[in-house]
Amino acid sequence: MATTGLPSDTDADIARVSEALAMITPRWHVRILLALGRPLRYSEVADKVAWLQNGQLHPKLQTLCEAGLVQRTEHTPRHVTYGHTDRGAALLPVLPLIVTWAEEHLEKADRPLPAIEQIEDSLTLLTRRHAAAILWVLKSRGEASGRALARTVMPDSDWTNVYPPLRQLVADGLVDSAGIGKPYRLSGAGDALGPVFGALSAWSAGQPLTQAARHPLWGRPDTAPAPKTWVSNQSRLPAPTATPAPSTNGQISSLTWQHRDLFSHATPARSGAALAAGGPRR
């Protein structure tokens, strides 16, 4: 059933991406997924996420299993392991794209942040209510008034209800406006979410992530993205590309980053130009 006034295929695309974000945004979900580098017993998972109190881990694992990202395998009544499903493993390559975006566009924190925190901060911004739909509309139209956005994004609601999420997106640095009564448009940071949204769209539609560049709205098939240094792990990681490279058999090649790298601390600060421009709120 349509949830916006957009064409049905676009509406479905937004719904799938929003659902994918909702799977991984809840607190600790990404950290648990990263802890599962291989199938682990419950006690082994608990050791890797020791900050979770007793009783917190099991419902998180259950939720991830219900989402189809984690599989519980009962080898014997006393031997149960948790590991990634194929869908869960296929989602992991999106995480470096989020970190690459965050390094360039999130405002500088008071302290160097591990890449895992960059991911969590970014996901919080992207799962604001109506955020995906508003960003989709502005990407497709270039700019739009609040009333026009409301007619498209929430056609069955009072049009003034669009302003709270719009103001939040402006405060987060993903949307710009010249002032009261002026149209809204994507900021540079909002527009730069293309690789992230393209990859999430491809994943949620069951396509390889190499299809992200061909997304009808967010893709840039004629532009080869320049490699960017992953600042949080500059000393250990090669520069990532916007989408994972395919192997000779058509599958996504294994990533060079390791799960533990996402927890390491960022060391270099962003350039002065980036800091002067500001960035989305954390």
Image (cartoon, grey):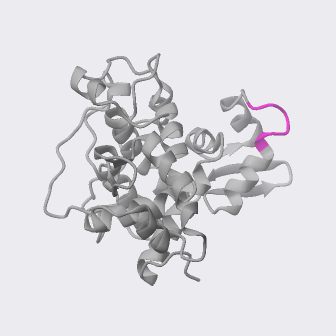
* Image coords of residue 274 (percent x, y): 26, 28
Q: Residue at x 20, y 41 (%)?
A: 227
Q: Nearer the viewer, residue 115 or 149?
A: 149
Quadrant of the image for the N terminus?
A: bottom right
Q: Is residue 91 visible?
A: yes
Answer left or right for 160 relative to 46. left
In percent of width and height, residue 269 lies at 32, 19
Q: Nearer the viewer, residue 149 or 84?
A: 149
Q: Is residue 106 magenta?
A: no
- Residue 61: give x, y in percent of width and height: 72, 49
Displayed quadrant of residue 250: bottom left
| Number of numbered markers | 0
Q: Nearer the viewer, residue 162 or 254?
A: 162
Q: Which residues are magenta?
A: 52-57
Residue 93 visible:
no
Q: Residue at x 47, y 16 (%)?
A: 111
Residue drawn at x 40%, y 59% is 135
Magenta segment includes 53 = yes
- Tell me what residue is drawn at x 39 percent, y 34 percent: 106
Farthest residue to the front: give it.
181
Between 74 and 240, the one lying in front of the other is: 240
- Relative to 125, residue 103 above or below: above
Q: Chief secondary structure of the magenta span?
A: loop
Q: Position of residue 238 (x, y in %)?
A: 27, 33
